[in-house]
Image: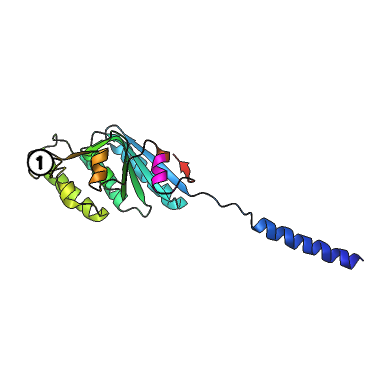
Amino acid sequence: MKYRLRIIIALLFVCLVSVAGGRVPVYAETVRVVHVDGDINAANTALVKRSLADAEAQGDAALIVTLESSGGSREQAVKISDLLTGSAVPTIAYVSPRARSVAALIALSCRHIVMAPGGSIGATDTEPAKDTEELKGKFSQVATMTGKNPRLIEAMTDKSLGYSNYAEPGQLLTLSDTQAKTVNLSDGTADSIDGVLHLYSLDNASVQD
């Protein structure tokens, strides 16, 4: 009788384990967000570097770089660009609401770009001539590395080029959120981080700021 009872208990245990095994929770993917606001400076570079290191160490599904900047240090922007283009973690720039001048370089250095409604991306005509030439080369390099249209990107730093239907020769190219989507520079428009996640089917992701 005791032997039979032991068998019954053992069978019940196996059944419970099997049922529990079907209920093992599936943990959501993690997406990290880093905010780059105001003038681009060394503090921004350190922040992006740390966030990328954490994202790679934790195996995050993506790193979202939110951008609200009209420019800043060219040197620091180039450093951030190099960090982003060398990242093993997929990177998404969320331009909310603007990425102008060297901040545009940071956005373009991400694999993907999403714009906020009313957002804009492009260079500004305030750089010294020498810096403009250097930036043009860097913008072109980044376009090649991230699979973006080089002709489009060059028009953001070389006013002599223009871009049909968007900028006349003599004007630097700046794009709105809808224009960026039309020319396939951005993947779409989103009014929040949740909206960005939805574009990439990451609605259930755990967000780390």
The answer to which image quadrant residue 167 occupies is top left
**Residue 3 rendering spot, x and y as whole percentages:** 88, 68
Q: Residues within 10 Å of mark 1 (few under 14, many from 20)?
A: some
Q: Quadrant where the C terminus lies? A: top left
- Provide the residue designation for mark 1: 159
Tell me, yes or no, if residue 145 can be seen here.
Answer: yes
Q: Is residue 202 magenta?
A: yes
The answer to which image quadrant residue 177 occupies is top left
**Residue 193 rendering spot, x and y as whole percentages:** 40, 39
Image side of residue 29 versus residue 49, left or right: right
Q: Is residue 135 magenta?
A: no
User: Looking at the image, which residue is at 9% across and 45% down?
Assistant: 161
**Residue 76 rendering spot, x and y as whole percentages:** 25, 41
Q: Secondary structure at mark 1?
A: loop
**Residue 93 rendering spot, x and y as whole percentages:** 32, 43
Q: Is residue 194 above or below residue 29?
A: above
Toward the right, the furthest residue is: 1
Q: Quadrant where the N terminus lies? A: bottom right
Tell me, yes or no, if residue 79 can be seen here.
Answer: no
Pick whichever, 192 or 52, lies toward us: 192
Count of numbered marks:
1
Residues in magenta, as a range: 195-203
Pick whichever, 17 or 129, lies toward us: 17
Q: Label 1 is placed on what type of residue?
A: Lys
